[in-house]
Image: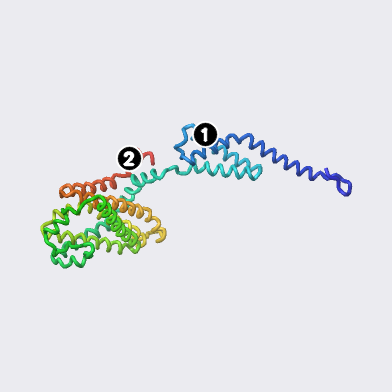
Amino acid sequence: MDIGIDGRIDTGATVNVGAVQNDTLRSARFRLEREAHWRQLDQLVTRAEKGGAAALGYDEVRNLAAGYRQAMNSLSVARDISLDRALIAYLESLCARAYLVVYAPQESLGGLTARLLLRGIPQAVRRSALPLFIGFLALILGALAGYKLCVSDPSWFYTFVPPELADQRTPDASADYLRSTIYGDEGHDSDRLAAFSAFLFSHNTTIVILIFTLGIFVSVPSFMLTFYNGLILGAFFAMFARKGLGYDVFAWLSIHGVTELAAIAIACSGGARLGLAVLLPGARTRKEALRHQAHDAVKLALLAALMLVVAAFIEGFLRQLIQDPAWRLAIGWGMGLFWVGWLLLGGRQGKASREVAR
């Protein structure tokens, strides 16, 4: 107690000290009653953060969920009765960590990749009928135009095909030389094949990136660039066909071209999705339509990149090592059937799954 100047007793200091002591005792008692549960939850959350929810057993997962609910209840009570700030901050942190473990997706990078391959990409392809039609149409029309023009006038070959790509394979070359470029032994040591495969992948990837990114300009540049690749294809085929090597060059192109050319057309399809969002946004604004279409467009671009990796391996290794045209055809079109089967059947829900989803 304090005695004032006027002689009266001042009890304010005693009341304030008593209130503080009472709050401290109440916080201590509150913590003592529940701290064991909080520590157990903290340990479970820490383990789950390090190794994922899969690192916990069934009983531990159940205790984790129960502990989270208890901690949330403790946090609510602590806020209502205005306990000390340090305790409230601790409970807020613990509850936030537990929430992420209990409710946030616990999927590893491998799980995300598997979901993308098994469902995401095939479903995106099946939703892209019109863009795929545009991509493959550009490639086919270009190939037909290049073939027709070069069959009627071989000089068109020099217009369509860059000199560095043609090398010495020109309409003026002899049939024997052209045949040697299809079946000749090019010194197939592993180091040269690996370097050749890396070069092809880099070259093809550059083309695909250009085709995809230019699609945002109303799809026209993507269509034209894909059409131009078709012109080169048609010109090459016409040159070999005029020398009586049509079947041989078809097999030579098939072993890697089925995958590689499909990747180019799919990249054009991804760009076309972006272009159609700008050209035909529908009820959405162009920005919203572009954001909406970008989800599937990116998946098509990832598919094209994956196919290019496979095509580079086939072109850099198998095409050089396998000389039999029948085997070249079987590998090339077998890969084509694999892509078609995966993209048409992947990610489809069974009847039971659809009923559950409803």
Farthest residue toward the right? 7
Q: Which residue is mark 1?
A: 63
Q: Is residue 265 visible?
A: no
Quarter of the view holding residue 106: top left
Crowding at mark 1 (Cα within 10 Å: few <14, some 14-19, many 20+): some
The residue sitting at 49% across, 39% down in the picture is 48
Q: How many marks?
A: 2
> Which one is closest to the eye, mark 2 or mark 1?
1
Quadrant where the N terminus sits is top right
Q: Position of residue 34 (x, y in %)?
A: 61, 35
The residue sitting at 27% across, 56% down in the picture is 200
Q: Which mark is residue 350?
A: 2
Farthest residue toward the top? 59
**In this orientation, which residue lies closer to the viewer: 274 or 334?**
334
Label 2's element? loop
Mark 2–mark 1 distance (CA, rounded to whole Å): 34 Å
**In this orientation, which residue lies closer to the viewer: 272 or 253?**
253
Residue kind at label 1, given as amino acid type? Asn
Q: Is residue 36 above or below residue 306?
A: above
Side of 4 relative to 358 (left or right): right
Quadrant where the C terminus sits is top left
